[in-house]
């Protein structure tokens, strides 16, 4: 997760910060600030409380940074939406996601828009639009 609460303030992971908690469940989290992965927070118990958790990538951060900080990683129930802007949830999807998981998130968030990363994954001939049957 990108943000944790430290004394009620939403902060990004930084070395040396203690007493941080998950904004979703309130359990302790620790900063992971190594040289390889994007700096992030992890639950001390090693299991993220959000069942939809996926590791944050530079691609996610670049999209989130297009919005004010208070719109990023917004807690909604037991989930963290990537962005909530003008009452619309924006989910940035960089990795594979199943159709069932897409339906589950859409049912939960209701008013939402997906932003999928197709860069480098498909050639022009492989990418096809399919009309959804309703």
Image (cartoon, helix red, strand yellow):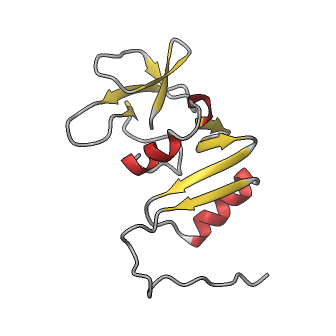
Residue 57 seen in render: no
Q: In this view, does 48 lie to the left or right of 24?
A: left
Q: Nearer the viewer, residue 128 or 103?
A: 128
Residue 3 higher or lower than 121, as above or below: above
Q: Residue 118 appears at what percent x and percent y?
A: 45, 68
Q: Which of 28 and 54 is in front in this view?
A: 54
The residue at the point 42 percent across, 41 percent down is 47
Residue closest to the eye, 50 or 64: 64
Q: In this view, does 106 lie to the left or right of 12?
A: right
Q: Which residue is drawn at 54% across and 25% down?
A: 26
Whether residue 76 appears in this view of the structure is yes
Q: For the point 39% across and 81% down, which residue is it?
A: 123
Circle count: 0
Q: Which residue lies furthest to the bottom in this view?
A: 125
Quadrant location, the C terminus: bottom right
Q: Position of residue 81 (x, y in %)?
A: 60, 44
Q: Position of residue 99 (x, y in %)?
A: 59, 71
Q: Which residue lies furthest to the left in this view?
A: 35
Q: Quadrant of residue 112?
A: bottom right
Q: In this view, does 85 lie above or below 122?
A: above
Q: Which residue lies furthest to the top in this view?
A: 7
User: Which image quadrant: the N terminus?
Assistant: top left
The x, y position of residue 95, in whole percent, is 43, 62
Report the side of 86 relative to 81 (left or right).
right
């Amino acid at each position: 997760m990108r943000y944790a609460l430290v004394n009620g303030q939403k902060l990004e992971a930084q070395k040396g910060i203690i007493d941080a908690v998950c904004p979703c469940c309130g359990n302790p989290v620790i900063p992971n600030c190594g040289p390889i992965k994007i700096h992030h927070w992890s639950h001390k118990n090693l299991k993220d409380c959000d069942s939809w958790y996926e590791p944050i990538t530079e691609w996610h951060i670049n999209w989130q940074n297009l919005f004010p900080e208070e719109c990023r990683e917004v807690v909604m129930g037991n989930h963290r939406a990537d962005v909530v802007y003008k009452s619309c949830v924006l989910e940035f999807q960089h990795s594979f996601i199943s159709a069932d998981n897409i339906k589950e998130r859409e049912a939960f968030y209701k008013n939402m828009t997906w932003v999928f990363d197709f860069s480098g994954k498909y050639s022009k001939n492989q990418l096809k639009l399919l009309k959804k049957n309703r």
